Structures are given as structure tokens and as C-alpha cells.
Amino acid sequence: MRRFLTLYKIEQKLFFRSPDVFVFNLCMPVVVLLLIGFIAGDQAAGGEDITYIQSAFASLTAVGICCSAFMSIPIVMVDYRDKKILKRLYCSPASPVRLLAADTLCSVVMSAISAVLVAAAAVMVFGYRMEGDFLYFMGAWLLTLISMFSIGLVAAALCRTTKSLNVATSILYFPMLFFSGATIPYELFPKGLQRVADVMPLGVGIDLMKAASIGADMKGSLPNIIILAVIAAVCSTVAVKTFRWE
Amino acid sequence: MSESIISVSNISKSFGGRKVVDDLSLSVAQGEVFGLLGHNGAGKSTTIEMILGINKPDTGSAYILGKDAASARKEIFEKVGVQLQSSSYQASIKVGEVCEEFASLYQNPADYHHLLEQFGLLPLIKSPVMKLSGGERQKLSVVLALIGSPEIVFLDELTTGLDVSARREVWKTLKALKAEGMTLFLTTHYMEEAENLCDCICLIKNGRKVTEGTVREVVDASPYDNLEDAYLWYMGEEVI
């Protein structure tokens, strides 16, 4: 365990050195929250009983998950495979899995830091208070994270080259970021685009997190919970079965 | 000769219908420096990969320390250090960090500060690996191969792309390892390197063994008096 933590500690340092992670994962969600908060914080969003700041809180705490799952995880894994770092690790008593696990943990931590920064800004700048149960919200956030990470792992497993990965991450990352309600408030979308967000995995996760954060009856969210759990189960199985470290 | 600690019997491997290694057998004794020589694409790296269990031979078997590396991976790689051809490192990682990472992989790692000092890399411990010169980077890959205090070290084209002085420096360190009784398995394109370091060499062409023996034996069995000419003769090429 101590040896794993050493590996994790160094990989985490490398994450903090990456400018992309810093900008997209840590800064961007806070900036978007501040913008939405100052422009329309207290207003009711789209006639539903949720304000823009409430909506932004739930969705922007998911942006870190989106960046980690669809950028950091697949990019790091394919890069390490390309550079033969995984192959080199195969030739050691530890397996490449240990490095992949350390990097996945780094991505979890980055997502969490991103969410904490968004929460801190919401509370300190806009006096945000969560109406729902904090533990439910945490559960929803964690389920969303696991589900999205499993999709990212599939991308990492299936993409053999950096080129195909760039295409895959663009297809996953940007639509999820903009059309799932993660950055641009879902409530501002026209009806058609809302249907699109409803079927996006990240949109499902955000919907669940929103429901938990405003204290809605969680029974209504059962389909969302099932969808996320199924995605997680199917995708992690596919990822494990198809992953090649070389 | 003492007992062989690497023994390869009749291994073959094809990729996409092309035979890369063809019925190759060899054995390496403890404390020996063994050189596998051949042109680019002769099957040197594939042979190493089969011995290390990265690739499975289509036929034949390869044992290292009496075991099949693929199935006894954990145990074998506590005792076997490896430098792979053209491997690289994480983008922003520093020398000290990559050493710490590798040390974390082993049960009883050697003190990497000591190894870095031995290879003259200690002043660079805080430098990014990307900023190292070619020679420094190759020396670092030897340090990483040694972190687990191995009994056998594999070096795949360690000195390719190095300038003359860097190559000499790497030789010096390899000779020191040899003096300590380490078994070395290396591939190289430089005949001078084989003459300087190897107790035993094996020449392969298109995945097949052409000849083997000590440098002296290999040269004496050819019409020439130096390894480079002899090598070209064995490879069936015109010696100018």
C-alpha cells in the first residue's frame, strides 16, 4: 500500500504540472459558476422550482468528472501505452495495472478538487446552501463519476493510437461538456436540445445530482440510477476485457 | 561453464505471416555477457520479448532462471532488470521522480541515489527527464534497470544513437557491472562494443542463428581477422 501511494503521489504531481488539467478541470467550472451566478443567480431557471445557482452548482460539480473521464484518463493511458511506459512496467514485479490504478485515483482526486472549488465559490460568493441531503448528493456524484470513468476507460481500451483517441475524446468530451447541461444551463436549452441532454450519460448524471441537491424525491430518479449503474457495469467489463497495455 | 540461467530452445515467432524468429536456440551462463547481433529487423528485440514473456513464442520455449517469465512474472522481475529499446517517460517527470516510481515497484529496491551517483547523474536528480542528453537518458535507463538489484540485466540497443564518448562511458559502467558478476544480455549494432564487452556472441539473420561462440571463435571461423568484417561475411554481404 505504501508503495502504491508513492506511485500515486508522483503521478499526482505530474497531473498538477499539466496546464490542460489546471485550466479545464480546476479553473473553467469556477469561472462559469461565477458568470452564471452574477448574471442570473437568484432567478428561477426555466419556470421550474430551481434557481440558476442551484442548477449551476449541481452541473458544474460534474465538469471535473467530465474532464477527468473523457480527457485525462484516456489521454494518459494511451500516451503511456504509446511511450511504452506500460510495457516497461510489465517488465517489473508490479504490473501496469498498478500505474493505471494510480492514475485513475489521480483523476478521482482532480474531479473532487474541482467539485470542492465550485462548491466553495457557490457557498462563499453566492451564499448557496444545499436543500437536499448532502449524502444523497455525494452518492449521486460518486455514481456519476464511476459511470463516466468507465466510459473513459472504454475509450482508452479501444483506441489503439493517439490519433484515433483524439477523435474519440473530441466526440465524447465536447458534446458532453456543452450539450449535457454541464456548463450551459440545461434550463436554457430549447426542448429538442433538452431531449439530447436527457440521453447523454453525463446529462443523466447531472439530472440525478440536481434532484439530490434540491431535495427532490429520489424515487423519481430511480431510472437514472439504474441507467448509470448499467453503464458502469457494461463499460468497465468491456474496458477490462479489451484493454491492451501494448 | 556454469549452469545456464537463460535457456531458449527452438523458439519461432511470426507476425502477419512473416517469420521474425525462426527456430532459435541459445543459452546464457551465469555471470556471462551475452551479445545478440544482427541487422535491423533480424529478430533481436522479438527474441528478448519472448524471453521476457512479453511475446509468446509460436513454438519452442524460453526459460529464465529456470522459469517461464510470463507465468512467474512477479518472481522473475524481482531478479531481472530490463532496458527496452526506445522506451520513454511521462512528459514532465523528473529524474528523481522516475527513480522513486521504479523503486516503489520492487520489494527491496537498491538506493537509487547511490546508483545515480555511480552513473554521474546525481546532480541531475531534479532535472526533467526530457531535458537530458541522449547519453544521460540511456544511463538513466540503466539505473532504472538496476533499481531492483537484479541478477540479470537485458539491454536492447543501449548505445544506439549515442556519440562516441557517451558510448565509451556506458561501456565503462557495463564493465563495472560485469566485474561485479552480473549477467548481461545485450543487443547491439556496434561490433566494437561486442568485442569490448561480450564473452559470447550469437549472430542472427532473418530470425535464424548464423553462428555463435566467443568473439575469437567467431572471427577465427571466418576468413577475416576482425569481427566487423567477419560479421559482414556471416551476413552474406560483400566485405569491402
Image: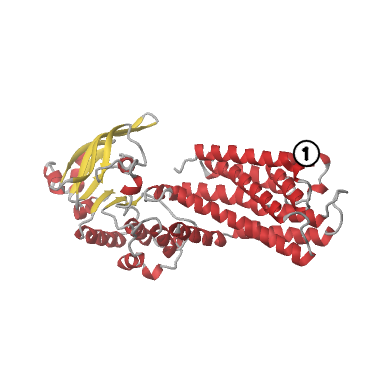
Q: Position of residue A31 (x, y in %)?
A: 73, 61
**Residue A219 in sight here:** yes
Q: Quadrant of the C terminus of chain B?
A: top left
Q: Please state which of residues B32 and A50 is positioned toward the viewer in this rendering.
A: A50
State the count of labels. Answer: 1
Residue A81 appears left or right of B232: right
Q: Position of residue A185 (x, y in %)?
A: 78, 50
Q: Residue furthest right?
A: A47
Q: Please state which of residues A127 and B162 is positioned toward the viewer in this rendering.
A: A127
Q: On the image, numbered disc 1 is attached to which residue?
A: A195
Residue A90 appears left or right of A31: left
Q: Looking at the image, which residue is at 84% across and 58% down?
A: A40
Q: Is residue A159 above or below residue A25?
A: above
Q: Position of residue A43 (x, y in %)?
A: 87, 56
Mark 1 neighbour class, 10 Å CA radius: few under 14, some 14 to 19, many 20 or more: few
Q: Looking at the image, which residue is at 32% across and 48% down?
A: B75
